[in-house]
Every structure is written in C-alpha cells, then in structure tokens.
Image (tube, helix red, strand yellow):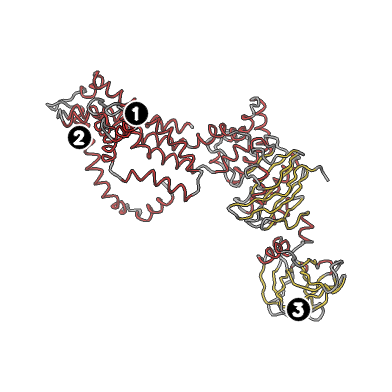
Amino acid sequence: MSSSMKKLHSLYTDKSGKGKLLAAPYVFWSAFFIIIPLCMILYYGVTDKTGAFTLQNITAIASIGHARAFWRSLLLSVVSTVICFLLAYPLAMILSGMKEKKHNFIILIFILPMWMNFLLRTLAWQTLLEKTGVINGILSFFKLPSLRIINTPYAIVLGMVYNFLPFMVLPLYNALSKIDENVINAAKDLGANKIQTFFRVIMPLSIPGIISGVTMVFVPALTTFVISTLLGGSKVLLIGNVIEQEFTQASNWHLGSGLSIVLMIFIILNMIVSALLDKED
Amino acid sequence: MQKELIKLEHISKSFDGQMVLDDLDLNIHENEFVTLLGPSGCGKTTTLRILGGFVNPDNGRVIFDSRDITNVPPNKRHLNTVFQKYALFTHMTIADNIAFGLKIKNKPKSYIDDKIKYALKLVNLEGYEKRMPDSLSGGQQQRIAIARAIVNEPKVLLLDEPLGALDLKLRQEMQYELIRMKNELGITFVYVTHDQEEALTMSDTIVVMNQGYIQQIGTPESIYNEPENAFVADFIGDSNIIAATMIEDKLVEILGVRFACVDTGFGIRKPVDVVIRPEDVELTAPEEGTINGVVTHLIFKGVHYEMEVMANGFEWLVHSTQLTPVGTKVGIRVDPFNIQIMNKPESEDEEAVALEL
C-alpha cells in the first residue's frame, strides 16, 4: 500500500471499523458480478446435465480437438507476447530517456487507439486485410502480388499484437523510467560497456515491468475469441472460441465451464511461477 | 608540490544555450583532496561529470596522467565516482555491488573475495556481504558506494555531494571517515559540495566556483582568511563586506573613519571592498574604539553571541562570547591584521557575481 493510500485509509476508517462501510459498493459489485459468477462456473464445471458430480468436463481438455485448440492458443499468444516484447522494449527505453514533453506526446499516440472500441479496431483490420480489402487494393494498384493472410494464424497474431501492444509498452516504460540515471552511470563508471550495462543493470531492474507487461499481453491473448473469430474466420479455432461455442451454440454450459476452469488454473499457475521467479531475483 | 595528475584546459560547456562553464582551467595534483565549492548552478557538478566522462565539454581538453581523455568514455577512464544518493544496484547483494567492477574486468574469484573483505573493512561494514542495499541506512549505503568505487583501485575518486542526504551528526562523522580513507588509500579525491564547512574541514585545496567561473583556489586557511572577492568572502562563513577607500598603503577609510591595515599595493585613494570576519570585530567601551555604535540585535548561538551593531550607517555583524545587551553603546576596534582588502570587481563577469549577493 502506498503512503498516500495509507493516509486515505486512515482518514476513512476508525478503530471501530465503521469506515469499512465505504467499501460496501465495491463489495456488493464484486460479490454479484465476480464471486457469484465464478462459483456458478465452478458448479457447472464439476456437474453434468443431471446435476451429478463429474470431472468429465475438466478432463475434456485432453480430447484431441480441445487439446489442439489449447495448444494453438498457447502458441499464438506466446508468439504475440514475444513480438510485443521485442517491439515495446526498445521503444520504452527510448521513451524513458526522453524529456517529459516529448515522451508524453508519443505515449499519447500509443494510448490513442485504446480510446476506440476494441471490436471496431479489430473489424477495421478485417476490412484492411480482406482478399478484396484496402491493403490488397493498394498492392494490386502497384501490380504487386496480393496478401492472403486473412483467416490465417498470422492475421490473428497481427490482431493480438496490434491490440495488446500498449499493455506491454506502458509497464515497461514505467519500470525503465524509474531507474535512476546515476545507477546506469555507475555501471559505466565501473567499467561496463553498453551491452554489459544493459544485461547486468537495466534489464534486471526492469523485471517487474517485464512481468506485468507479459502478463497483461499473454493472458488476454490466450483467452481471446473475438480476434480469432474476426481475423481467423472459422478456420482457426482457439480455446476461447471452443469455450464460447459451448456456451452459445452447443448450449453446453457444463463443458464450457469445465474448460474455463482449466484455462483459469493454467493462468493462475503461470502467475505464481512468475511471481516466485521475481522474488528470487 | 606533488606531481600534476589532472589538467582541465579551457573547458566550456553550455546546456540549452545556458553557459554553465566558461573557459575553465584547473590543475589537480596527485594525492590531493580537492573540493569544488559553490552554490547550486555554479558548474561544480558539471565539472565533476566532465572528469567522470558523463558530460562532454563543448570546448577544451581533459588531460589525465599526461594523456588526453576528453573523448574517452566513462568505462575506459581510470577514475571512479561516488554518486549523489548512492546509486547502488538494488537488485544485487552488497558483495555483488562491490564486485561489479572487478567482475567486468574478469578478475579471479579469490582476488574479488579478498577485495570485498578489504573494502568492507575500510568502510567499517564487515559482515554485510549478503545484505541487500535497501536494508541499509543512508550512511551505510554511502559507505558501500565508496567501497564499490575504491575496489577498482582508481587513481582518482570523484565524489558528488556524497554526504548531502545524511543528517548533520552522521555528516560530521563521515567527514572524518573520508579523511581517514583518503590517507589510507593514498589517492586523489575530487569532492563536490555546496557546504562550506565540509569544504573547510576536509580539503587540501578548495576551488570556489560561481556562475561557471573559478572565484578563488587555495588552502582552506587562505580562502577563509584572505578571500579575493566579495563572493568568496560571503560564501565562506559570515562576514562584514563594506565599501571603503584605500587612502595609502596600510591605511583604509571605512565608513568615513580611518583604520590601520596591513595590505599594500592597492594604490592611493582607490575604492576597495573590505572584509572583516564577525569574530574579528572587538567591542570596547564607547569612545575607546575606532567607531562608536549601538547594539541592535542579540542572538545566543551556543558557542558565542551573535550581535548586530549599528555604527556609521552600517550594521556590523559581531560574534563575541561576552554578553552585551541590546541598546548598549559600544566602541568597535579591529586588529589591522584582520582587515582584508579586496579589489572592487572590474570585469562584467565579476560584477554579475557581485550583484548576486
């Protein structure tokens, strides 16, 4: 808890705990829209249509179709995360070395797309990438071979990178700009060249930013079904699509919930591992 | 005098069109404790950063050990810096912090271990190898920063206001520690501070700077006792700076009254500034001094009383162990030896400096 938060906290809570009433709206909100739905997913996940206990919905992940979708999701989200990282890190480094006025403008440019609806932006990519879309229109005008990436995994990765890049840039920028310039100077002063300074000082000090950036890209990328539906057509099925279809088309809430639980456990395990790694450093 | 180690020649530097250093020349000798002293914005830190290689001068050369290192990057210079606010690597243990420079140079492990032990002993923090920097107090972190620098056996240690973030008591302790370390290591220290007391306590040589110019270079005694201009006199300790006229050699007219002094060679009937330290103003019974006055303010300062005495239209700052209540009529007497005559500022630059006061 930051010091300012503590101050706020002590302002609004007295020893009798009456101030806790202030938390009531949020408690109400999270109970009805987070905790109860989660319990329902848990319940549906471990029961069958008759209401009897079963683990079939969970073990269903091992079936070939589901495992393949899960593997594909994992692959695409890892690839997207890596691309986002490689694009964002150098940018964040440049930004953190810039003067206040300049970098504020560039950050604004990065955040600007986030002010528009996520679905709209993805639909725009669909129009751009279509066989007879804008990009191919321009290419054919210059007599260049047309691109065929719509409805392929490449289009999905493109969509993921485009949508989630800001979530990688901001935490990295935040972590890098917190590094005291004199700490970097100290490394040089002690004889480290640019590469040594980067790998021994800058990179290790930015690990908290790397972990939160990776989490903020990897998790939504792993669970997305909108990007894969719009840019992958029905040809590339991700685990998010499978779950969505179980709920909407197949009306099998039990299987959909079971697969959701598997996905959640996988993500939670990942976060625990990365938190442990962070502590060790 | 020891051998010359560092020469700064005609160094100029400006940031965003603002001149920070203007044609600065400075020689630093082997095994010397040099302090760059001045108010913030005087260019002292920039000078240190130019020595360390973190700032490139617009003009001029940096000579180190008779080699031009003006364009040598910091990692290739044989000097190390102790930064303001320590700048320790917070993701490493104390041992790894100290070993950083040695590991970069691929020294053998046994050598590194010995060096860590030696450095921690030197800074009085034995047994702290496994601790993390965040778990140490400010004073301890500063000692680690010094240890991290000196294990590399630099010929010169640059210190950028290293005691600035510490409280008074710790600062005084660390001043003695630094002098001890310097004597033990036998290397050159270049120290930056705005604290005149720190400078007087530790230095062999003080370089007083203001607005990018060196105002005076000298030993602490000569800087304090014989300031060359009003800025130095005012910046180093309290002082009475009074416009006066040099009547002839060894005689000066201050506030319409003639005082005997010891300075010669200022010419006849020349306007000058005189500096009289408050502890050198002697209060006598009225009519027994050179000027008569009245005590207008009195503050108890612990070691002495600080008084203001109005005499001939000037408020004299006086330090005395004798209590003289407000309203007392007194005489003022100054030993000729304690009247320091200074030339009036002549150039525009000096004028600007004087106006700042």
Chain-order first, disc 2 or disc 1: 2
Label 1, on which residue? A144
Whether discs 2 and 3 lie on one chain: the answer is no
Whether discs 1 and 3 lie on one chain: the answer is no
Label 2, on which residue? A40
At numbered mark 2, what does the secondary structure look like: helix, strand or loop?
Answer: helix
Q: Is residue B263 left or right of residue B294?
A: right
Q: Chain of mark 1?
A: A
Whether residue B228 is situated above or below residue A192 in the rendered picture: below
| Quadrant of residue A75 within the rendered picture | top left
Q: Is residue B338 left or right of residue A189?
A: right
Q: Nearer the viewer, mark 1 or mark 3?
A: 1
Q: Nearer the viewer, residue B298 or B182?
A: B182
x, y percent for residue B152: 68, 34
Q: Determine whether label 2 and label 3 are within 8 Å by CB.
A: no
- Give the CA separation, mark 2 to mark 1: 54 Å
x, y percent for residue B39: 65, 57
Residue located farthest toward the top when viewing the structure as drawn: A64
Q: Is residue B171 visible?
A: yes
- Give the CA separation, mark 2 to mark 3: 94 Å
Q: Amino acid at mark 1?
A: Leu
Whether residue B244 is situated above or below residue B10 in the rendered picture: below
On residue B330, the disc is: 3
x, y percent for residue B257: 80, 78
| Mark 1 residue crowding within 10 angstroms, few (<14) / some (14–19) / many (20+) | few
Q: Chain of mark 3?
A: B
Q: Is residue B46 left or right of residue A145?
A: right
